Image (cartoon, helix red, strand yellow):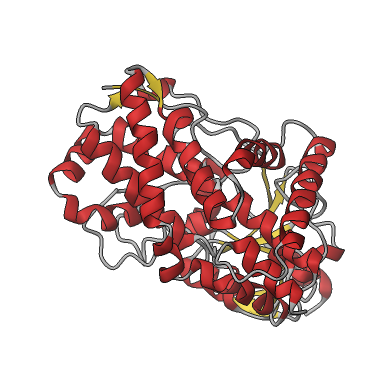
Amino acid sequence: MSEDTIAEALPPVRPWPALDLTGVDFDPVLTELMREGPVTRIHLSNGEGWAWLVTRYDDVRMVANDARFSREAVMDREVTRLAPHFIPDRGAVGFLDPPDHTRLRRAVAAAFTARGVERVREKSRRMLDELVDELLQDGPPADLTATVLSPFPIAVICELMGVPATDRQAMHTWTQLILSSSHGAEVSERAKNEMSAYFAKLIGDRRDSTGEYVTSLLGAAVGQGEIAPEEAVGFAVLLQIGGEAVTNNSGQLFYILLARPDLAERLRAEPEIRPRAIDELLRYIPHRNAVGLSRIAMEDVEIRGVRIRAGDAIYVSYLAANRDPDVFPDPETIDFTRTPNPHVAFGSGPHYCPGGMLARLESELMVDALLDRMPGLRLAVPPDQVPFRKGALIRGPEALPVTW
């Protein structure tokens, strides 16, 4: 078969514009791509060229777990992407492949095990109770995002990282500037450099530490020569930023519960189903816009009869995988009794979100506190008037106006 014939056999390249979607509407472009086939080609708003996209659950997990697809190789390429600026540091954990990736993750593994997460449960619950106390004291109406959903995850990730309470606001400001696409590359770059300089000092001060904070574990690993200082700093930045994703996820979670009071009432009446319900909401929520980080095929790989050539860029869509009807029957329905529920909201493979267990803990604590302590909690505006973030890579309400 000639090269021309192969080129003709390729699926068309579909433009995927950056959309400012409201509510928990599923991306209409992604819906079309899923209908078009399991392996399609896309062009995003920024970067160059086109990339493959896989949307079926089994294929997404295969690509995420297969060493033939490299994150590290992306560093040397100008790949089509959603983000207007591409500012990863060489050696950043998100762009490492095993064994380097494994070595870096091992350094902080203790903080994100079940035991490590349980260590912060009681302090997290106390911090949350204080926020809810203040909310009740100030009275309605209120913005649930500003009063609870934003300060709580910041406090928890800062506690786990070992960032003093006095520096939480600075961390939050830097994170927002790094994650927003509306301020320009220079502003994001400066915020990232400032956060990196902060963690470089904190980790440097903790090289002889035996503490359980993430920065203590990273400091000890640097002190013992297991990881380089710049690797530790890059990882700390990634974990700190990732900790705030809970604000957006929980914003969407409570938006769904308050826009559909029947769901909230069921969770009040049946507290025993809450962990399963949270998993179902995590499956359903559209966590981000478009797709995240790409990979590069290191050799020819066939997926569903389509040949991905060595050097081709490829994306997986965890959002699409979570709506695969072969794995999740009636995927558009929120079903609190769904079992099993092997969703991939936290990713899959070596780059599975290290904070997944922590995010689940925070969601459970917030659902318990807000539903039980505020039985009259409801939206203060119609659901279609809740403002959602614009120009951001991660989706979520900008504010969640509530009353009770």
Residue 253 visible, this angle? no
| Residue occupying image coordinates x 70% and y 82% | 99
- Front-most of 261 and 291? 261
Based on the displayed image, in which of its 4 quarters is residue 275 positioned? Answer: bottom left
Based on the displayed image, in which of its 4 quarters is residue 173 positioned? Answer: top right
312 w.r.t. 51: above or below: below
Judged from this view, the residue extending furthest toward the left is 269
Q: The C terminus is located in which quarter?
A: top left
| Residue occupying image coordinates x 75% and y 71% | 6
x, y percent for residue 365: 33, 48
161 w.r.t. 144: above or below: below
Query: How many marks can you see?
Result: 0
x, y percent for residue 398: 52, 29
| Residue occupying image coordinates x 63% and y 65% | 216
Q: The N terminus is located in which quarter?
A: bottom right
Based on the displayed image, in which of its 4 quarters is residue 391 positioned? Answer: top right
Side of 50 where 119 appears, left or right: left
x, y percent for residue 343: 41, 63
Residue 59 visible, this angle? yes
Side of 183 where 395 appears, left or right: left
Side of 143 where 403 appears, left or right: left
- Front-most of 104 and 133? 133
x, y percent for residue 79: 79, 57
